[in-house]
Image: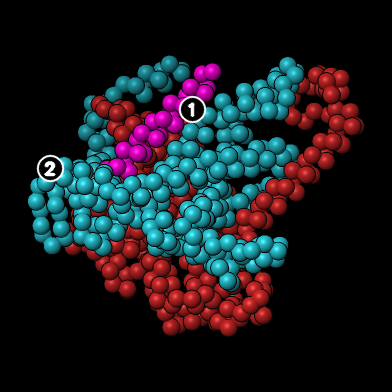
Amino acid sequence: MAILHLTKRAQPRRSDTKRAYLFLAPALLFVLLLFVIPVGYNIVISFFNWSAFGQRDFVWFENYLSVLSSERFLNAAGNTAYFTMLVVPVGVVLSLIVALGFNALMFRKGTGLLRALYFAPVVASLTAVAFVWLWIFNPSYGLANTLLNGLGLPGEAWLTSESQVLPSLAIMYVWARLGFNVIILVAGLNAIDRSYYEAARLDGAGPFKMLWSITLPLLNRQLVLVVSVEIMNALKLFELPFVATKGGPVGASKSMVTEIYELAFRQDQWGPASVYVIALFVFLIVITGVVRKVFTRDISE
Amino acid sequence: MSTRQTPARGTGTTGKRVHGPVGVRRSRRIQQTVLTVLLAAGGLLMLVPLIWVALSSLKRPDEILSLPVKWMPEDFFNVGNYVQLFAEHDFGRYMLNSFIVTAIGISTSLIIALLAGYAFAYFTFPFKEPIFLLVLALFMVPQEALVIPLYLMVSGAGLTNTYLGLAFPDLFTVLGVYLLRQFMEGIPFSYVEAARVDGASDLRILIRIITPMVAPAIAVFVIIKFLFTWNTFLWPMLVAQNESMYTVTVGLVNFAGSEFNQWNLINAATMISMLPTIILFITLQRYLVKGISLSGMK
């Protein structure tokens, strides 16, 4: 019976191909409109001296050379990289700790409510998150400095200090994203067969040994997902600096995407802006490639 | 410790409900209580920023800029800030625009995803695997980064300041295709087979038989899509050039820029922008959580 079922499914009907592509047509059209054409278009623009007022001069690699050697690009790329290196490890480790906590919790009653507390910030837009924290970090009326002063400590400059601005944005970001990752990791932890732990316990393995040799390898898929999504979202950082700091102070929180916006839509430099886009894609591809490599090696060990 | 655990050996395979001697049980109960307290404390800490904004949104202009900073508003029913935002500013309009754009995005992407999911689940055709892998790979493309060509395309088509233009990048979502295909593959093929034998067209099978059966997946998708579309900012900021077309995120940023330091109003506006997603979250939390965990399970 099962074999019959399989063969039937595998056997294509004559009209299938035409019909399938008919059903797929709208999706493929939008893949073309929203991904394929834009990527190609973006590459084309990157070779032009392109203005919104009609100028279209083919300039070969001039945009690439001028952008990649510019102070401005290095600043934006450096800020974005620094931000990513702050939020990804901190965000992933924190959400892993919380997820392990939920997983170790035995009474299931009320866990939903407890989990909701962690998830609540996820529903807020990053625009709203920026305002929430702009007010918390307000130097004179904000909660952050009020609490510090209450503890007898001096207030911090937070978003208004060149050295603190990116860590402050990282706090906002980790807060906003934590619940999302917790849910994915908890789902992954729930799927792990308990008998592995029983077997390991009989072998005398301690909790850290179990975490290292059972939980993390079996959570590999969710960890890769969480890490890659986090990297992607961190690299396209835009709303938080755009709203909360306008890229300041002195450009200390300008990101790749705020510069893309600034160059194209404010300064009419579409060619250089599209070079930033391509650089962003290259970063993304390289970094997620490395992540996948690292995590697959982990599991084979 | 090892000697105490020996009695548990017999029940080892039944899972975690191992009833050890009294000492173990008590220490486990203490452990669990500590864990719950820690998780609850962390959870409340996560909530503090939202509570702080909610409380601040109820303060009067003079109250919010007075020192020392107080937690509580003097009048918990002071909704004057909210009234002002709707009466003297255009927040009603912004909300309406956001709802329209979100509705367009949800319905279009859902229909496209249903059709594509059906094709992947119930048809055999050449290049099926590579096409599906291509669609999956688009998961990792940050669409926001493609604003330059997308904007040139949309403005070239004369779609700036239109709802269609505002919804354009949201008309299709890879997640929908993936989610619906997963659910449809779970439905026994015999349903489709039997209907085909009866002479039903595939479109009819999709509408009459499959769509009702994947209702939970549709619910999950609609909620996640609502959240993402409602919260977008960069794209609507570029495409909505007239204030009458602002979505709520754009309206919020624009308003805060013009009402500098009116923090009572800015906090209330932030609350307004979050209200629909918070309500959605409170009422449909189960589906949302399910959707996110599903997207993490491949």
Which residue is tagged 1?
A295
Question: Which amino acid type is marked by label 2?
Answer: Trp
Q: Residue at x 66, y 76 (%)?
A: B68
> Could you tell whether A43 is left or right of B229 in the image?
left
Q: Which hue belongs to chain A?
A: cyan
Query: Which quarter of the image is occupied by the C terminus of chain A?
Result: top right
In the image, the chain rendered in red is: B
Q: Label 1 vs label 2: CA separation?
A: 39 Å
Q: Is residue B104 visible?
A: no
- Please give the label number shown on residue B261: none
Span highlighted in magenta in the image: A278-301
Do the residues bearing badges 1 and 2 touch, measured as CB atoms within 8 Å? no
- Please give the label number shown on residue A60: 2
Spot occupied by residue A210 in the image (x, y as percentages of width and height): 67, 25
User: Across the whole image, how many numbered discs are drawn on residues?
Assistant: 2
Q: Residues within 10 Å of mark 1 (few under 14, many from 20)?
A: some
Which dot, 1 or 2, sits closer to the camera? 2
Task: Note whether B75 is above or below B155 in the view shown.
Answer: below
> Could you tell whether A183 is left or right of A25 in the image?
right
Camera-side residue of B293 and B104: B293
Camera-side residue of B178 and A62: A62
Q: Is residue B55 visible?
A: yes
Spot occupied by residue B107 in the image (x, y as percentages of width and height): 36, 54
Spot occupied by residue A161 in the image (x, y as percentages of width and height): 49, 60
Q: Residue at x 63, y 49 (%)?
A: A115
Question: Which amino acid type is marked by label 1?
Answer: Phe
A295 inside magenta stretch = yes
